[in-house]
Image (cartoon, helix red, strand yellow):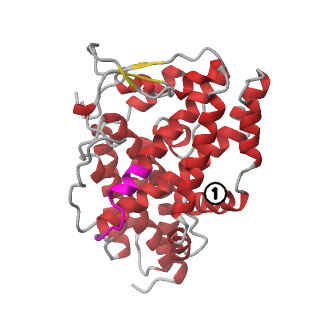
């Protein structure tokens, strides 16, 4: 079928999103610990949100151009979209909005429940729902979307963020998701500490993002190229979340800068200096790509053109900027006893046995 340029762009967009969904789905079986798997699964929920926005547009555009009565095919696509939307809305959309595409405050109980809700069985349900929607779309369009053709398990790494469950020891974790990692964690007693722990969780996510890209650096296959892209999509999203939480007051909460100013934190001057030295042109380009390609997909522009812009992003410059921001944050934290605790690296506590696997159910628990 010869579709118009605009409809063909929508088909390209949906195909792109489906391949990223496939990548996230395939990563669920990699030998990483539960925390790392959930950090990587954030990509799936970002792409589901985009699919639910783009797919109805593609359906309508295709129906406007296809000949004949397509009532049965229309209903099949709409039913499949509805099923996926019902699974996503009201719970897992919050996982996307509060933890994945953004990093926003949550109560500790709300955070633990939301994080723990992402497990193997949930991923299987969503992949099945997406597969049904894909099949209905393919029947309507009369063409197939290209799957990921050459999956192979990723190389095993020793040490670093991409650890296995077997490598996890009982440790003390200072970030806001510390309680989910099967160890001990710090309990916040003030909003300034909660904000600092939220920033640390973003830093933790960035370490996973970059470790994933390093694992498939110089990719030789379509699968590893897509894994490399997925890691950088998450890194761009997380960098924007880091900047927002360090420096920008929103309707959701105050920035770390404002929290520290309110309590006269000793590291405030250093954090203000870090803010004044920001690379605003780089941030503008990163945020543009976040809003048009990574956290959302702008289908009012050529998807191939936006993908080309993303491919030309200077990754070394972005990585160095992330490192500078994280190091500046850590140095500022060291200037006050109240925030110095945030610089504590995960400390192994030998001789302590873990009575339970953590405060959330295991990722692979299908009971």
The spot of residue 324 in percent (x, y) is 60, 48
Q: Is residue 309 left or right of residue 19?
A: right
x, y percent for residue 176: 51, 27
Q: Nearer the viewer, residue 116 or 175?
A: 175
- Could you tell me which secondary element the residue under label 1 belongs to? helix
Give above or below for 337 relative to 298.
Answer: above
Residue at far bottom of view:
2
The residue shown at (26%, 37%) is 164
- Taking 235 as reference, is 155 left or right? left
Per the image, the residue denoted by label 1 is 287
Q: Is residue 337 above or below residue 13?
A: above
Please tell me which residue lies in front, 22 or 184.
184
**Res 115 seen here:** yes
Label 1 Cα crowd, 10 Å radius (few <14 / some 14-19 / many 20+): some
- Quarter of the figure with the C terminus: top left
Q: Which residue is rendered at x = 66% and y = 57% of the image?
A: 283
Q: Position of residue 319 (x, y in %)?
A: 53, 55
Q: Quadrant of residue 353?
A: top left
Whether residue 82 is visible to the viewer of this picture, yes or no, is no
Residues drawn in magenta:
210-220
Task: Identify which residue, 87 or 197, lies in the foreground.
Answer: 197
Q: Position of residue 11 (x, y in %)?
A: 44, 72
Which corner quadrant holds the N terminus? bottom left
- The number of callouts visible is 1
Tell me the residue at 42%/62% (across/down). Answer: 229
Say whether residue 226 is magenta: no
Residue 87: image quadrant is top left
Judge by depth and name the residue closer to the eye, 208 or 38: 208
């Amino acid at each position: 079928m010869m579709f118009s340029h605009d409809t063909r762009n929508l088909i390209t967009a949906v195909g792109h999103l489906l391949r990223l969904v496939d990548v996230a789905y395939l990563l669920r079986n990699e030998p990483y610990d539960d925390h790392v798997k959930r950090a990587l699964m954030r990509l799936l929920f970002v792409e589901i949100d985009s699919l639910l926005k783009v797919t109805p547009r593609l359906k309508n555009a295709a129906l406007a151009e296809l000949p004949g009565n397509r009532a049965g095919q229309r209903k099949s696509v709409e039913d499949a979209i509805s099923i996926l939307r019902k699974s996503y809305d009201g719970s897992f959309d919050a996982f996307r909005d509060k933890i994945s595409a953004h990093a926003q405050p949550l109560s500790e109980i709300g955070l633990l429940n939301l994080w723990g809700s992402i497990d193997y069985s949930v991923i299987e349900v969503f992949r099945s729902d997406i597969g049904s929607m894909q099949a209905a779309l393919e029947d309507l369009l009369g063409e197939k979307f290209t799957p990921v053709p050459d999956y192979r398990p990723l190389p095993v790494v020793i040490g670093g963020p991409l650890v296995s469950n077997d490598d996890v020891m009982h440790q003390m974790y200072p970030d806001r998701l510390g309680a989910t990692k099967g160890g001990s964690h710090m309990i916040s007693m003030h909003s300034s500490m909660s904000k600092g722990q939220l920033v640390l969780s973003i830093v933790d996510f960035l370490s996973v993002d970059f470790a994933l890209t390093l694992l498939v650096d110089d990719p030789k296959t379509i699968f590893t190229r897509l894994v490399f892209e997925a890691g950088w999509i998450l890194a761009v999203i997380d960098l924007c979340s880091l900047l927002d939480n360090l420096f920008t007051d929103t309707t959701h909460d105050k920035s770390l800068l404002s929290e520290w100013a309110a309590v006269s934190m000793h590291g405030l001057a250093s954090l203000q200096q870090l803010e004044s030295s920001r690379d605003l042109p780089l941030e503008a380009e990163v945020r543009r790509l976040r809003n048009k390609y990574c956290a959302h997909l702008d289908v009012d522009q050529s998807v191939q053109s936006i993908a080309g812009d993303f491919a030309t992003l200077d990754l070394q410059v972005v990585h160095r900027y992330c490192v500078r921001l994280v190091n500046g944050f850590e140095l500022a934290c060291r200037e006050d006893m109240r925030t110095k605790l945030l610089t504590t690296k995960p400390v192994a506590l030998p001789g302590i046995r873990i009575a339970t696997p953590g405060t959330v159910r295991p990722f692979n628990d299908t009971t």
